[in-house]
Amino acid sequence: MGIISILLPSLAAFLLFRWAISAWRAYNSPLSALPGPWYAPFTNIHLQIGFARGTVWRQVEAAHAKYGGMMRLGPRQIWVSDKVALKQIISQIDLNKVMMYAEMSRDKNSAGLFGEVRPNEHKRLRKLMTPAFTVGYLDQMDHLFQKPVEDMMNLYKSNLKPKSAVDGMKVNLMTDLHKIALEVIGECAFGRGFGSVAPDTEPEPGFSKEQWQKIPDNIAKGLSMRYAIVFLKRSLRKLGIHMEFDWPTEMVAAIESVITRRRAGHEAGRQDLVQHLIDNGVRPDNGQKMSARDILDQLSELMLAGAETTSATMCYFMMELARNPDVRKKLFKDLPALGLDDPLITGVEVRQDPRFAYLTACMQENLRMHPIASEFGRRTTDKPVVLNGFEVPPYTVVSASYRALHYNEEYWPQPHRFWPERFLPIDHPLKGDAPNADTSAYYPFSSGKHSCVGMNFAWHEMRVVLANYCARFDITEEPGQKEDIRQYITMQFHDGNWNARLYPRL
């Protein structure tokens, strides 16, 4: 007891001394020249809590409104929404990604493009993945994008009632669009859908439907949980406690089964993402052939990019249509009115046919107002970096607040207005008095070496899904819903719900 009574005060004094030294250094850092809350030099606990609760984006946007385009929110954490500095961060200087991304990977040495923070490995991995995301490659996969949409339209058809044209059909559109996005990824990356829209979908041979259908949920929950505890994981490692994560056994077995069947010649000639990785996949760190777990690491991030992000983006699109009847009226006038039994509009049609120019402008404006995330996390290394005249010291976390940039009135007049006409060419008949979009202040898919490799995939999916929804249904929003947006990797409705009514156009 006597030893403990001596050790505990000594330990407390030592920790207090360490904190005081760190606080003194942070207070006297060059970052002290930046505006920010008084407590920013001393602690980042408020940021850790914000990340864990998914609300840090609100803290950041409120702070930008108060402190301006470059500010300090932690001892070595700054946020930037200044257009010049943000371009330097993302594409000109192209700062390295923060280590937090690697912390979300199962194995930081086998991360996907999202989690890979090592510059050389990221470059090799991007070179591997890019051929599977070209416009031409995706055009050949258009039928895989269409199948889940067709299944959802068939489901709606079975649920329609005689008065649906007047009363509408109530749907949880966030859930429905998420299911479609999951099925698209299932078709394109796992070789078959998961049965979330069409329950009779056959699972991978050797697996029950229940096991197969759990795969996307396991991936989404695993990645979100890793994001929420990323600071805890790093803190525990300083104490010698290493938190390790692995995919559930049945998920690894499922991918191994797909790979084994493909290599044995089953489904020969199928062009999709898993086949691309089977044929060409090598680890970026050692050049060895990718194992089943390595491929699963890549596919899990593709699922995040192709489902968690795109489904939310499409839901925000439909929400903006429901809230802006003038935009909806213009859009429906341009689009064909189709029935549920009519052939689907293809992604190629939407990209090439001038009839869909206003739809494309609506999608671009939606990405401005509802970007996939609120920021990109970057960092300086062992040398200082000058951002728009301010010297940022080494080992500083630099977050590029591109959502705040998208709402900056200097670049986007009436930034809270859903105004698709911004993105129309001057000679378009619907242009009106809308200002031209300032694309130098627009980063829906980032830019530079770390831009989203799946950008073409996301665009193709949005074209197929949104064109076919809007051609078939008018929409209104169900009243009384709470709009609580949280960011766990991506910006999402906290409860996963957004209810609407769909009215058949024919």
Image (cartoon, grey):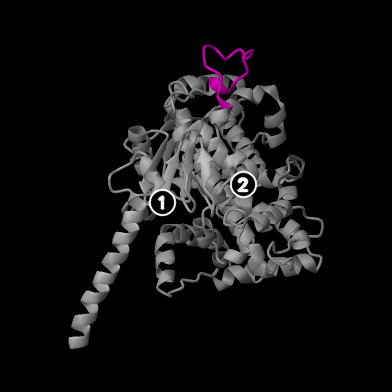
Above or below 447: residue 358 = above
137 or 28: nearer the eye?
Answer: 28
* Mark 2 / mark 1, whichever is N-terminal: 1
Which mark is drawn over residue 390? none
Q: Position of residue 389 (x, y in %)?
A: 49, 35
- Is 374 on the left-hand or right-hand side of 19? right
Q: Nearer the viewer, mark 2 or mark 1?
A: 1
For badge 2, the amino acid type reads His
Q: Position of residue 230 (x, y in %)?
A: 44, 60
Which mark is drawn over residue 76? 1
| Crowd band around label 1 with a 10 angstrom C-alpha radius: few (<14), some (14–19), many (20+) | many
Confirm whether residue 128 shows in the render. Answer: yes
SS at circle 2: helix
The question of residue 407 being in magenta is answered with: no
Q: Position of residue 216 (x, y in %)?
A: 55, 58
Q: Which residue is mark 2?
A: 450
Q: Position of residue 330 (x, y in %)?
A: 54, 19
For badge 1, the amino acid type reads Arg
321 or 436: nearer the eye?
Answer: 436
